[in-house]
Image: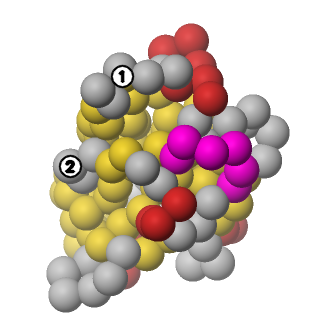
């Protein structure tokens, strides 16, 4: 059974930097395309970043593109999301996800496994 566990959230101030981690166990990590999504109160899931199974390709939402980086460490079964210059509008629960099919995916429907999420709150 695949398990997805995020960590690294918390209370931040505008302008801070953040690094989220996500460990995926129970499957073949190196085969999974991976993604990060977020959900603010009362909002739908929003795509944040994705990385393909090779690690060679990445994609980002326009709202975070210039200040974010997604990376994977296959030796540690971990994917990271770094965000700089945090803004209050980045406040959300951040979810890590793994897909079963090769590619670079931006929709939640492309992913099969999700974590419980980690809260990120950015104060002004």
Where is the C terminus found, in terms of image quarters? bottom left
Which type of secondary structure does the marked residue at label 1 adopt?
strand
Quarter of the rendering containing residue 67 = bottom right
Q: Is residue 65 above or below residue 95?
A: below
Which one is in front, 91 or 11? 91
Name the N-terminal-most of marks 2 and 1: 1
Residue sitting farthest toward the right: 56
Which type of secondary structure does the marked residue at label 2 adopt?
loop
The structure residue drawn at horizontal position 60% and vertical position 72%, both measured from the top left corner, is: 61
Q: Is residue 117 above or below residue 62?
A: above
Where is residue 110 drawn, in percent x and y? 53, 60
Q: Which residue is mark 2?
A: 116
Where is the N terminus found, in terms of image quarters? top left
Position of 3 with respect to 33 (left or right) is: left
Can residue 25 be spotted in the picture?
yes
10 Å neighbourhood of mark 2: few (<14), some, or many (≥20)? some
Report how far apart the C-alphas of labels 2 and 1 lie in the structure.
14 Å
In the image, the segment drawn in magenta is 99-104
Where is residue 122 drawn, in percent x and y? 27, 68
Where is residue 108 drawn, in percent x and y? 45, 66
The structure residue drawn at horizontal position 31% and vertical position 36%, both measured from the top left corner, is: 4
Mainly helix, strand or loop, the magenta region?
A: loop
Q: Which residue is mark 1?
A: 25
Query: Is 40 inside the magenta-drawn segment?
Result: no
Q: Is residue 81 above or below residue 95?
A: above
């Amino acid at each position: 059974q695949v398990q997805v566990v995020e960590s690294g959230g918390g209370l931040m101030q505008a302008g801070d930097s953040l690094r989220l981690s996500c460990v995926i166990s129970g499957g073949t990590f190196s085969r999974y395309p991976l993604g990060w999504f977020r959900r603010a109160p009362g909002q739908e899931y929003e795509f944040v970043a994705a990385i393909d199974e090779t690690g060679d390709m990445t994609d980002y939402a326009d709202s975070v593109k210039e200040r974010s980086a997604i990376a994977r460490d296959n030796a540690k079964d971990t994917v990271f999301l770094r965000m700089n210059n945090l803004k209050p509008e980045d406040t959300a629960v951040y979810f890590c996800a793994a897909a079963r099919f090769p590619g670079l995916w931006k929709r939640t429907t492309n992913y099969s496994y999700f974590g419980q999420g980690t809260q990120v709150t950015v104060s002004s």
